[in-house]
Amino acid sequence: MDHLYPKAMGHLVMLAAVFHYSESTLSVSANPEIFNPGLTTKLTVKCNYVKNDTSTSSPSALVSLFLSRANNGSSDYEEFASLNVFLGQQVNLITQENVKASGAINSTGESFIALTWDSPAEDVAGSYKCTAQGPDHVGHSVVIESTVDVKSSAPGNKDLLSQIQQLDSHLKQVEATINLMKTDFAGQLVQVSKNDTHVLALNDQTAQDINTLKQANANSSSANMKLLLEAFRSSVFSREFNGPNATYWLSKNSYTDVRDAENLCKLYKGYLVEINSDGEYAAVREFLNRLDTEIYYVYVGATDERAENQWVYRSDGTPVQFTDWAINQPRPGPDYNCMFMEESLGWRMSAYRCTSLTPIYALCELS
């Protein structure tokens, strides 16, 4: 009889009318629903079914669960993973992707399929459909479905900043733990040292070991941050050129606040371009004149916020050494405190508001 049940069930599905329903007993979720390739460390898609004994449009007995996916806006779903009562509690994966799967069919409680990707790639994005099948109380085959969209998003400056802040927070937690260990060791050994001077030497060695560990961790975190910044350099900068004494990187995105543009440069150990000489000015203007994109303004790292018409460099507050203002520039008044180079003025210098709705690009200078 054990061998006949699957075959009989197959005939039942073929001959009976098939009804499609969408019930609250079935759900599919993604965590997160929008991920950043290269930054997101884990993505989970879960198909979840809970038996509803009061529903007449849900399977009275769950036979199978399926997860399928449609990529790139397609409406054609391809089966990705399945689980049924005949094959036990093992999920059948129909993919070559590096994904972990778990699942269970429970006749009285929760049934599910869960898929987990570590560091998901862009092609994991798509529409995921969860399908549950089984007979209703009179033997009809019932199919209920639920979908969720999983989207990928190229990491931007905010994503990069968030990741760096998380790394920095982790480093501080590790340092706090190490300092706590060091204090604890010191307290214990001071007590013991009253009777054993040999332990004092051990305390010194222990402190050295802890400091070595602390320095190694700091070096490791610093190296990881450098690798992260380098990995996303092409995502945040579109062009670069080498000048006589510095390298200049032009941001891919525009900004409406000079502080956001300045923070981008600081991330890469640079600052908004500071014009110090006629030669540097000519090199920067030549670079900007060669641009074939719709870029009309770039920030210059100078301001007169502290004193009207007393222009200083934003990075260190020293007086600006070189200016070449366009006609009728700089604009007077308390609102025009930031320096720009403007395409309509032949890429000469102008003064404007430090925050505005005009898209302005960051030109970072790295010594």
Image (cartoon, rainbow, N blue to C red):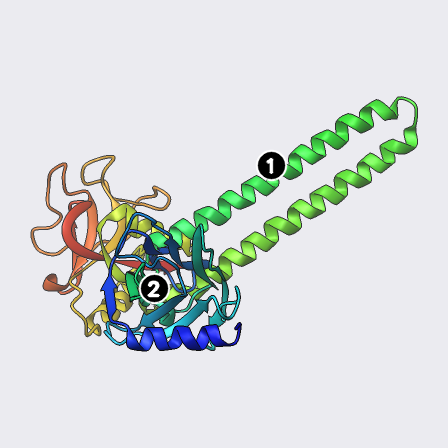
Q: Quadrant of residue 196?
A: top right
In the picture, measured across the screen, residue 353 lies left or right of residue 185, that is left
- Amino acid tagged 1: Ala
Tell me the element at label 1. helix
Query: What percent of the width, then of the height, locates residue 34?
Result: 33, 58
Q: Are marks 2 and 1 in contact (CB under 8 Å)?
A: no
252 or 92: nearer the viewer: 92
Q: Is residue 243 visible?
A: no
Task: Tell me the residue at 76%/32% (across/down).
Answer: 185
- Determine which quarter of the picture holds residue 152: bottom left
Please, what is the three-letter code of the amino acid marked with disc 2?
Pro
Q: Is residue 264 above or below residue 196?
A: below
Marking on residue 176: 1
Residue 43: where, in percent of width, then height?
A: 42, 59
Q: Quadrant of residue 250?
A: bottom left
Mark 1: few/some/many CA within 10 Å (<14, 14-19, 20+): few
Residue 300 location, x and y as percent?
Answer: 25, 54
76 and 202: which is toward the camera: 76
Figure label count: 2
Residue 12: % across, % down:
35, 73
Taking the spot 36% from the left edge, 77% from the top edge, the residue there is: 11
* Residue 135 tag number: 2
In the image as oriented, which residue stretches furthest toward the left?
A: 328
Which of the two labelled residues, at mark 2 and mark 1, occupies the earlier sequence position?
Answer: 2
Q: Residue at x 46, y 59 (%)?
A: 105
Q: Label 2 neighbourhood size at 10 Å, few (<14), some (14-19), many (20+)? A: many
Question: Rounded to the nearest whole Å, what is the CA distance between mark 2 and mark 1?
Answer: 59 Å
